[in-house]
Image (cartoon, coloured by chain):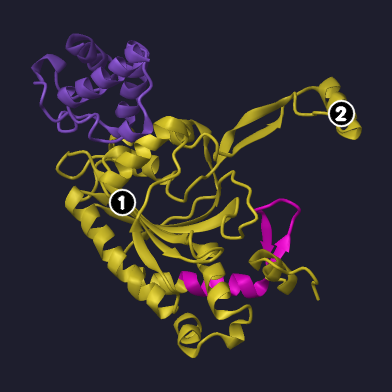
């Protein structure tokens, strides 16, 4: 038994639900934890699966050239994870091994590869949709799920560096995408209601970097482009965003040249589910033993 | 100041219409000003007038029209000169 299990993270690790790796925000998951994720994933599908979304699964890495074009580095340079690999010759290799052994900086011959870590499940999608040509009359609806990376090490288990994001992305006319977002705001309340979690919905902003970021964040809030469904996990005062509802207007449509059937610039919106965050909210509010969770919650997840 | 603001707007605003055709009170967002172009505009205005736009002015209202921008820049230039 752990003698110093003060924090929620300590309790999760002590219980074996999360497994330490030595890096804050990077954890292994136990079978019990993964089962909750899988059941929540299936619950999302029960709500959204009838809409006819096209299922696409991307790996957690994306094309660096497309990432560069996406504008992510304009807004979140501090969160991005780029992948580097050794690019030297034999002599450089010998130098690397020597420096590594001496505990010195060994990264001189590491070069950027063509792959970066996906910051959100939907980033690789937009160029793929653009490449298909004009949207069909009804627009498109896509179901995504991917591990994502954000460089923000934290002791808060709800702020992981590598985590899964399930998303539904709607691409179409402004009417189609705003209707989609309104539908999911409504569904989300029913969905979280089934899980008996305390929550509230609020206008939100993305964590844009720097002074320019404050302007972008204020713009985003003024226009009510982002909503979050928040559940207290690590603190009551600063509840955690477990679901988010984002209306990008024509940002991605213009950037990638996505056109509607009527040859207008497409608008996009997405609903994102923080899979680990919802699992953590369940463990926080219903206890670490899933067998002891309220019957209604067990029924919603395990049927 | 109005002329200089219009030059900066033409260079950095990425508007859908010619800046010369925009009246001082016209809505710049309706003229195609995007959030990201607003950031470029902010930096160019700060550079051009040697001012720093404070947090309280970093919002949509500040950049809504040439008139609104001019009022903010005038205030900041006045403050700088008074300092």
Compared across the picture, whether A31 is left or right of B22 comes to right
Chain A display color: yellow
Viewport quadrant of the N terminus of chain A: bottom right
In the picture shown, does residue A57 fall above or below A194? Answer: above
- The residue beneath circle 1 is A269
Q: Front-most of A23 and A233?
A: A233
- The residue beneath circle 2 is A99
Q: Position of residue A157 (x, y in %)?
A: 61, 60
| Chain with colour purple in the figure | B
Question: Going 87% across and 31% down the picture, which residue do you hit?
Answer: A97
Q: Position of residue A250 (x, y in %)?
A: 26, 40
Q: Chain of mark 1?
A: A
* Helix, strand or loop for disc 1: strand
* Magenta segment boundaries in residue numbering: A18-41
Q: Residues within 10 Å of mark 2 (few under 14, many from 20)?
A: some
In the picture shown, does residue A112 fall above or below A17? Answer: above
Q: Position of residue B61 (x, y in %)?
A: 22, 34
In the picture shown, does residue A19 fall above or below B52? Answer: below
Residue A138: which quarter of the image? Answer: bottom left
Cα–Cα span, label 2 and label 1: 48 Å
Residue A17: which quarter of the image? Answer: bottom right
What is the residue that sits farthest to the front in this orientation?
Answer: B82
């Amino acid at each position: 038994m752990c003698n110093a299990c003060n924090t929620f993270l300590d309790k999760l690790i002590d219980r074996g639900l999360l497994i330490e790796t030595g890096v804050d925000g990077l954890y292994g998951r136990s079978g019990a934890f993964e089962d909750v994720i899988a059941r929540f994933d299936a619950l999302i599908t029960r709500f959204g699966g009838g809409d006819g979304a096209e299922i696409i699964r991307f790996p957690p890495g994306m094309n660096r050239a497309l990432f560069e074009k996406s504008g992510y580095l304009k807004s979140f340079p501090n969160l991005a994870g780029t992948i580097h690999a050794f690019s030297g010759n034999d002599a450089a290799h010998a130098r690397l091994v020597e420096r590594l052994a001496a505990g010195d900086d060994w990264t001189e011959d590491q070069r950027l590869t063509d792959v970066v870590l996906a910051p959100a499940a939907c980033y690789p999608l937009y160029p793929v949709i653009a490449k298909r040509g004009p949207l069909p009359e009804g627009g498109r609806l896509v179901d995504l799920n991917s591990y994502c990376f954000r460089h923000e090490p934290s002791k808060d288990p709800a702020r992981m560096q590598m985590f899964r994001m399930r998303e539904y992305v709607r691409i179409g006319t402004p009417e189609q995408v705003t209707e989609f977002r309104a539908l999911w705001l409504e569904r989300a309340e029913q969905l979280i209601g089934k899980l008996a979690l305390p929550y509230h919905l609020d206008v939100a902003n993305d964590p844009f970097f720097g002074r320019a970021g404050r302007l972008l964040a204020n713009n985003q809030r003024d226009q009510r482009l982002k909503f979050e469904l928040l559940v207290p996990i690590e603190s009551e005062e600063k509840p955690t965003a477990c679901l988010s509802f984002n209306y990008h207007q024509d940002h991605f449509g213009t950037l990638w040249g996505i056109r509607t059937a009527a040859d207008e610039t497409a608008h996009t919106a997405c609903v994102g589910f923080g899979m680990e965050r919802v699992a953590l909210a369940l463990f926080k509010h219903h206890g670490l033993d899933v067998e002891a969770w309220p019957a209604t919650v067990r029924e919603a997840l395990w049927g | 100041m109005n002329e200089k603001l219009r030059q900066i707007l033409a260079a950095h605003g990425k508007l859908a219409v010619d800046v010369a055709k925009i009246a001082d009170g016209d809505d710049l967002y309706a003229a195609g000003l995007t959030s990201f172009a607003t950031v470029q505009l902010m930096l160019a205005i700060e550079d051009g007038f040697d001012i720093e736009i404070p947090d309280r002015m970093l919002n949509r209202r500040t950049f809504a029209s040439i008139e609104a921008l001019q009022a903010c820049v005038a205030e900041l230039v006045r403050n700088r000169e008074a300092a």
